[in-house]
Image: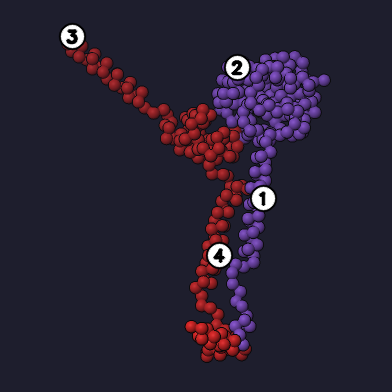
Amino acid sequence: MTESNTPAAKRGVPLWVQILIWTVLVALLVLVGVTLNKRQQGTVQPGDSIPEFSLPLFSGYEFEGRNEVTLSDFKGKVVVLNFWASWCKPCEQEAAELQEAWEFYEPRGDVIFLGVDYVDTEPEARAYLKKFEITFPNGPDKGTKISQMFRMSGVPETYFIDREGVLQYVKIGPFASVNEIKSNVDPLLP
Amino acid sequence: MQKFFFGSTLALLLIAFSSGLVLAQEPTPSDDEVNAIAKQLYCPVCENTPLDVCPTEACRQWRELIRQQLNDGWTEDQIKQYFVENYGARVLAEPPRQGLNWLVYLLPPLIILTGAYILLRSMREWTSPKSIPTDSDGKGATTPKPKDEYVNRLEEELKKRK
């Protein structure tokens, strides 16, 4: 009788451990892949419907007496959603232009400007709003929920949402002039 | 007159000295107290930078906010909770134990334990003696088995070539 006929002792890693290891590895790879894909997607794209969100407003910057607004409150209106922060120097470049554009459209009633203050402290945010004499509704992005929803890449960033709640244009960086803002709002008006 | 002059000079010196001490004091709460909390938080703007060492204007504002909150009697947990509510859970140096965050706590020990288990098994295999071939009756072979005829011939041929 030769050695090859003896029953081979089963050694090595048990099957269930191997399955567990491979499952964990594959799950990790999927997780990393999904996260990377999400990051590379960039901001929400023109043509995307913007999901509902709510924005608490700073005292003194309310909308028609309300201290919190939702996107659906502005159904039928063009929404200009501007992300900014008091520590953001490029935001200062466009602050006056945004206010001027708001003063131009406000009497019409079918355009609303909303300022979303991104990771900021309230006293500095208020000082910024006062410094640039901004009057349109403004509020903090609590828990960075809105900026995450828009997959915002930095400040300033401005989103032009049409009357049906569909994103039409994204401006990354500051506006050079009031006309640049108007050129993106006017085509969305009836 | 001389006594009055001496007394006035001494009083002025004492005032000047005491006001010097006041100016040398640290702000309340001190930077160390602020940084003790700030180092448990991360800058929400610049990735992977703890708040206590972050040089940006935004982080300076947040450190001042912590100082103000400490001054108002807030506890460490209340301050951290405020930061989470306002800037999201990503500002925490230690992620909260919930949802997918559990992976951060469970995966490393799990990987270490699995690795240790595999290593232990492999080491046992390497150090254990080779299994002794047994006869068909189940008894261990006590005498060396006669060599295969082919092996014998091979060895003879090799000897001849030497």
The residue labelled by disc 4 is B118
Q: Which label's residue is closer to the chain start, 2 or 1?
A: 1
Chain B takes which shade in the image? red
Residues packed near mark 4 inside 10 Å, few (<14), some (14 to 19) or many (20 plus)? some
Name, please, the residue furthest toward the top: B1
From the image, state whether disc 2 or disc 3 is nearer to you. Answer: 2
Residue at 49 percent of width and 29 percent of height: B60
Q: Is residue B84 above or below residue A80?
A: below
Q: Foreground: A45 or B150? A: B150
Residue at numbered disc 2? A132
Q: Chain of mark 3?
A: B
Judging from the image, mark 4 belongs to the subunit labelled: B
The answer to whether marks 1 and 4 sit on the same chain is: no
Q: Are marks 2 and 1 on the same chain?
A: yes
Amino acid bearing label 1: Val
Query: Looking at the picture, which amino acid does disc 2 mark?
Result: Phe
- What residue is shown at x 67% (from left), y 15% (from top)? A100
Left or right of residue B20: residue A20? right
- CA distance separating discs 2 and 3: 62 Å
Asked where in the image residue A175 lies, by quadrant, the reply is top right
Question: What residue did someone put label 3 on?
Answer: B1
Residue A47 rendering spot, x and y as whole percentages = 77, 32
Residue A149 visible (yes or no): yes
User: In the displayed structure, would residue B82 be above or below residue B113?
Assistant: above
| Residue at 59% in and 34% down | B87
Q: Are marks 4 and 2 on the same chain?
A: no
Real-space Cα separation, disc 3 to disc 4, in angstroms: 95 Å
Checking the image for residue B84, the label placed there is: none
Counting residues from the N terminus, which is met first, the one under dot 3 or under dot 4? Answer: 3
